Image (tube, helix red, strand yellow):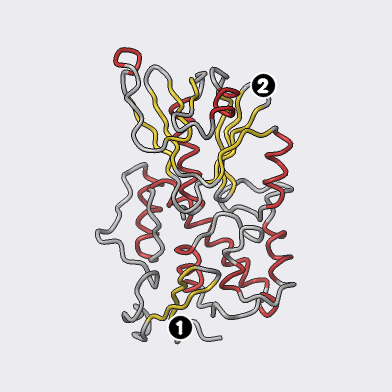
Amino acid sequence: MPEGHTLHRLAHDLDDAFAGTAPRASSPQGRFEDGAALLDGRAWRGASAWGKHLFVAFDGDLVLHVHLGLYGKFHVHAGDYAATGAPDPVGQVRLRLLTADRLAELRGATACEVLTPAEAEAIQARLGPDPLRPLDELNDPERAWHRVHRSRTAIGPLIMDQAVLAGVGNVYRSEVLFRHRLDPAKPGSALREDRWRAVWDDLVRLMPIGVATGRILTVEEDVVAAEAALAAGEPVPVPDPLVPYVYKRTGEACFVCGSRVRTAVVAGRNLFWCGRCQRR
């Protein structure tokens, strides 16, 4: 499932493509025909993300809400569509947005619906704070801490609970817990506030690099190099192959202590950790 940085990057790409336009909307698949008819020809007001949810505001107080789920894709293409016309859709295209030079196609999303602003805000209110959004009354990391320290649930599943923390998926979960040497089985109620704040601050540091590059960089030397490149306005160096600390490295040696990386299914996804570095 795409993590939060992917949705924020998608929101940026969609704004770059459609800001200042009134795209034609259609549903070649037919499953979103009524919603597309509501959006068709309306002025684009802006795209944003909250965690793994995408929101696009249109003129007339209409909001497109998309959750990609496990299989959803939302691709943006450039072309001279005024001259050539839009190409025939390939596959099950739920929503198509079209202008003279941009085409966006949504496939396989878990949610695709037209909401009022109040309905969109109600979804956002149910989500935890998002490390990629500016802080405000609703997007307050204190809300996440309030839920964490009152819960006996282990930090492994808690950190990926979207009602606790929005946008963190399996990769960031495994990697940030390793970066802070936190045992995934440690109950939230046993976690010190300063350690939780350090995790939040680290996500605020790491996830914008994911937005900028489209890749998840978590190894410290890669993060430092990326920060320097972004500050200088230069291309971000991405290692090839990109090797994280623990994610998908089951049985391999930990970079820090040499112990074997472990894995277990936690909250429906494979969690990776080092049993020595991350002892309770």
Residue 13 falls in which quadrant of the image? top left
Give the mark nearer the N terminus: 2 vs 1.
Answer: 2
Q: Residue 60 shows which numbered tag?
A: 2
Which amino acid type is shown beneath numbered disc 1? Cys
For marks 2 and 1, give the one nearer the viewer.
2
Front residue of 206/228: it is: 206
Q: Residue at x 44, y 50 (%)?
A: 71
- Name the foreground residue: 16 vs 227: 16
Q: Nearer the viewer, residue 59 or 209?
A: 59
Query: x, y percentage for residue 147?
Result: 72, 66
Residue drawn 60% across and 73% down? 155
Badge 2 amino acid: Gly
Tell me if residue 12 comes above or below residue 127 in the rendering.
above
Farthest residue in the left direction?
A: 240
Please state the total of marks drawn on the protein image.
2
Residue drawn where x is 47% and y is 35% of the image: 94
Mark 2, Cα crowd under 10 Å, few <14 / some 14-19 / many 20+, is few
Mark seen at residue 277: 1
